[in-house]
Amino acid sequence: MSTDWKGLLGDAMQDLGELAKGNPKIMSAIRTFDEAAAAHGALDAKTRELIALAVAATTRCETCIAVHSKAAVDAGASREELLETLAVAIGLNAGAAFVYSSHILSAFDTLSKK
C-alpha cells in the first residue's frame, strides 16, 4: 500500500478548513470536544495521541490516521510505543469480532427455530 500521507494530511486540513469556514459552529463544537478530552490532564499529549491512533485503527479513518500520526510524532511517541498501541487495537478488534460472532450465532439459532 502506498499512501501519500503528507499529501492526505495537507488535503484534509484544507478540506476541514473549508468546512469550518462554511459552518463555524461545526468547528466550535469540534474544538469543544477536543478541549474537553484534554481538560482533566491525567493523560499527557503523547498518550492521548496513541489512544487516538488505536481508535483510528478500529474505525478505519484515514484522515484520523494522518492527523494523529503527525500529532503523535510531534508529542514524542516512539515507533515501539506505536507498535504496542496498535497491538492493543488489533486485539480489541479481534475480541470484538469474537463477542459479536457469539451474538450472531445466538441470533441465527433463535431465528432459525420454528
Image (tube, grey):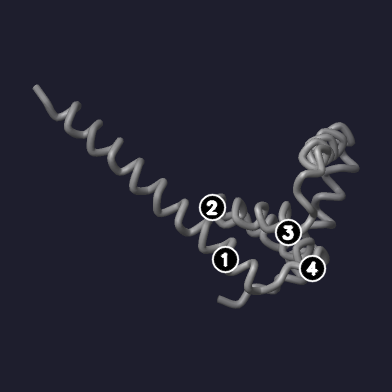
Q: Amino acid at mark 1?
A: Glu
Report which residue position mark 3 lands on.
68
Q: Quadrant of the N terminus?
A: bottom right
Name the secondary structure under disc 1: helix
Q: Earlier in the sequence, mark 1 or mark 2?
A: 2
| Position above or below: 95 against 104 | below
Name the secondary structure under disc 3: helix
Q: Are marks 3 and 1 in contact (CB under 8 Å)?
A: no
Q: Quadrant of the C terminus?
A: top left
| Position above or below: 91 against 34 | below
Report which residue position mark 1 lands on.
84
Q: Which quadrant of the figure has residue 32?
A: top right
Q: Earlier in the sequence, mark 3 or mark 4?
A: 3
Residue 44 locus on image (x, y percent): 79, 53
In percent of the image, x 41 and y 46: which residue is there? 96
Q: Residue lying furthest bottom in this view?
A: 2
Q: Amino acid at mark 3?
A: His
Q: Earlier in the sequence, mark 3 or mark 2?
A: 2
Q: Tag 1: Cα neighbours inside 10 Å, few (<14), some, or many (≥20)?
A: few
Q: Which mark is residue 76?
A: 4
In percent of the image, x 33 and y 48: which residue is there? 98
Q: How many angstroms separate mark 3 from mark 2 (CA)? A: 14 Å
Q: Amino acid at mark 4?
A: Gly
Report which residue position mark 2 lands on.
58
Q: How many angstroms separate mark 3 from mark 1 (CA)? A: 16 Å
Q: How many angstroms separate mark 1 from mark 2 (CA)? A: 15 Å
Q: Earlier in the sequence, mark 1 or mark 4?
A: 4
Q: Earlier in the sequence, mark 3 or mark 1?
A: 3
